[in-house]
Amino acid sequence: MVRAEDLPLGRRVAAFAFIAIAYFFYAWSFNTVDVLRPYIAQDLHLDRQQVSYLYSFQAVGALLGAFVNAQLADRFGRRNALFLLMVAYGLSLASGALVTNLAQVLAQRFVLGYFTGSMFAIAVGLYPGLFEQRRRGMLAGILLSSYNLAVTVQGEAGRYFLDRDWKILLWAGLIPVVLAPLAFLFVPNDRKLIPWGGELPGKLAKLPVSELFQREFRSRTLLVIGMTGLNFLAYQAFNGWHTTYLKDTLHLTGDSIGAIVGALFFGALVGSFGWGLVADRLGRRFEAIGFLGAAVIIVFYLVVPLTVGQRQIAIFLYGLCYSSSVVWGPWLAELYPTHLRATAGSLFNYGRIFSFAAPPLTAALSAGIGLPLTMAIGAPVFVAAAFIWSRLPETLARRTLLVG
């Protein structure tokens, strides 16, 4: 066994950098379900109700993958799981370029969700143990930046490819397949590593997830699931239909859509750095204020007539606000014992239970009240998520603005 403190800083930074690269391509893969939604619908001749099921199938796959793979990773090694995930989600994404009907694309999205749904948990299981607590918020910010950078780059690529050959964005899945073996070179073997702080991993139960629902952690776990679930619900109500709103309601071109989507995730990229630093100074619960800001901007964005340039600014600020959830990674790792870190990280995806029905429900609702009003549902849901967030334990030993 080797202590994380005894590993050279360069080795630990290299490991984190590789995890961030894997996270970049995970983000690229997962978010194609929203970015490419109107183009998949057009290519496969799907109506709004049918295409809404793409996210639902991907979300079901993500929940199942998080439940199964996170526990396997805690038992058989998170580095091993990282390698397998990169290969699997890369091939799953690329296969999307070959589907020809609704049944095939739903199956493809389920499989892609199964493997990408585990990535957050695996990352949370790996990087917090390599660094001290007061650096984890910053590292989470960098990791989320890699996520948002992926979708920012995807948005910029979309400006060129969406109206030409949008399937190029799916073939990019072959890149992480090639990079996956490098995990064994850059990432330390977590099965032989004592996490930072010297806490020896405890003995896993036969079903590790059962420990999260024991009396000591049960209420905490249920609140976390509720918070993340409302986050996913709000995200799908607004972000999930964003490109459809821009294309079908505002009738914008692919270039304008790509520019606005790029601004959204550039805002989230910038926000993730800032919120990560704030989390290491003011605590994990303070960041709930970001969700309140996101709620206000949703209403403004949908009600006030805006030019493309003004819309880019507004959506940039929205991305800046909702990226406050950057701290959830290290926070979940700190809320539970070290031997459960990947399993605890999987709680992030348990919240998808709330969002399974969100796309088809909002699709049906939009037919009656219109897409803008349907998307506005995200505002009160973000407020509810912020309230739960403020009620969960603070793990950083400092007073925050939301501590009673």
Image: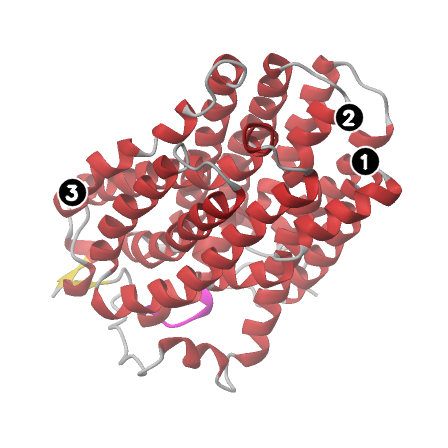
Disc 3 versus disc 2: nearer the observer: 2
Write down the residue under mark 2.
249
Could you tell me how far apart the alpha carbons at marks 2 and 1 are, in whole angstroms?
Answer: 9 Å
Magenta includes 292? Answer: no
Write down the residue under mark 1.
372
Residue 396 in sight: no
355 left or right of 350?
A: right
Q: Which mark is residue 181?
A: 3
**Mark 3 nearby-residue class (10 Å; few <14, some 14–19, many ≥20):** some
Check disc 3 and give the amino acid type.
Pro
**Mark 1 nearby-residue class (10 Å; few <14, some 14–19, many ≥20):** many
Q: Are marks 2 and 1 in contact (CB under 8 Å)?
A: yes
223 left or right of 104?
A: right
Q: Nearer the viewer, residue 240 or 190?
A: 240
Could you tell me how far apart the alpha carbons at marks 3 and 2 are, in whole angstroms?
Answer: 44 Å
Q: Residue at x 36, y 70 (%)?
A: 340
Residue found at the far bottom of this picture: 215
Along the polypeptide, which appears first: circle 2 or circle 1? 2
Highlighted range, magenta: 334-338
Q: Position of residue 156 (x, y in %)?
A: 50, 18
316 left or right of 68?
A: right
150 left or right of 9?
A: right
Disc 2 versus disc 1: nearer the observer: 2
**Which element carries disc 1, helix, strand or loop?**
helix
Examine the rendered structure and indicate whether residue 8 appears above or below residue 38. below
